[in-house]
Amino acid sequence: MAADPRARRGASPGVRASRARYVLLLFCLTLASCVNDLDRERRCRLAVRSLAAAPQRAVESELDKVVAFGSYALPDIEQAMHSAPVAKRLRLLRAIERVQAPEAIPFLRFLARWDTDDAVRRTAKQTADQLGRVRSAK
């Protein structure tokens, strides 16, 4: 009794084609999510830069854009803080305060201790204390 030739080769051509379509679909979805994440990173960085560079009348709308990214914006905010003048550092601290991300506490403590401006140090300390209370309340 001869065995079925399809049994020796594995799956039938229809099943192999179905698997190939499934693998291709998974690949496309993975690629699309990577591209979307890169776009999110770029948009976040642009939002933080726009907040730092915005004229006074546009600060609130730019602040809302940064806050929409949540804690994802923290690395970009930290990077922008290093080269920003005092007024712009205060704007960026407002963004951290509105994001309410406890992950920012170590950076805020660093600013509270080492920043060159008194207003920035005071605001960073207040924001760190506020976020610490929020974290302990959860």
Image (cartoon, grey):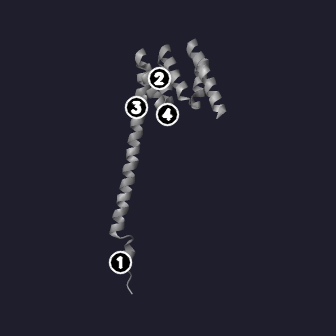
Disc number lying in front (3 or 1): 3
Q: Please give left or right for residue 81 compared with residue 112 in the image.
A: left
Is residue 55 in sight in this rendering? no
Classify mark 4: helix, strand or loop.
helix
Report the quarter where the C terminus lies: top right
Q: Badge 2 is on which residue?
A: 80
According to the picture, the residue beneath numbered tag 4 turns out to be 72
Residue type marked 4: Tyr
The Cα atoms of the two marked residues, 3 and 2, are separated by 15 Å
Q: Picture coordinates of residue 91 (x, y %)?
A: 49, 19
Q: Residues within 10 Å of mark 4 (few under 14, many from 20)?
A: some
Residue 17 in view: yes
Cα separation between marks 4 and 1: 55 Å
The residue that label 1 is drawn on is 5
Compared across the picture, whether 112 is left or right of 65 comes to right
Label 2 – label 4 distance at C-alpha? 14 Å
Label 1–label 2 contact, CB within 8 A: no
Q: How far apart are marks 3 and 4 (CA)?
A: 11 Å
Which of the two discs, 3 and 1, labels the residue nearer the N terminus?
1
Looking at this view, name the residue that lies furthest to the top. Answer: 118
Of labels 4 and 1, earlier in sequence is 1
State the CA–CA distance, disc 3 to disc 1.
Answer: 56 Å
Residue at the image position 39 percent from the left and 81 percent from the top: 3
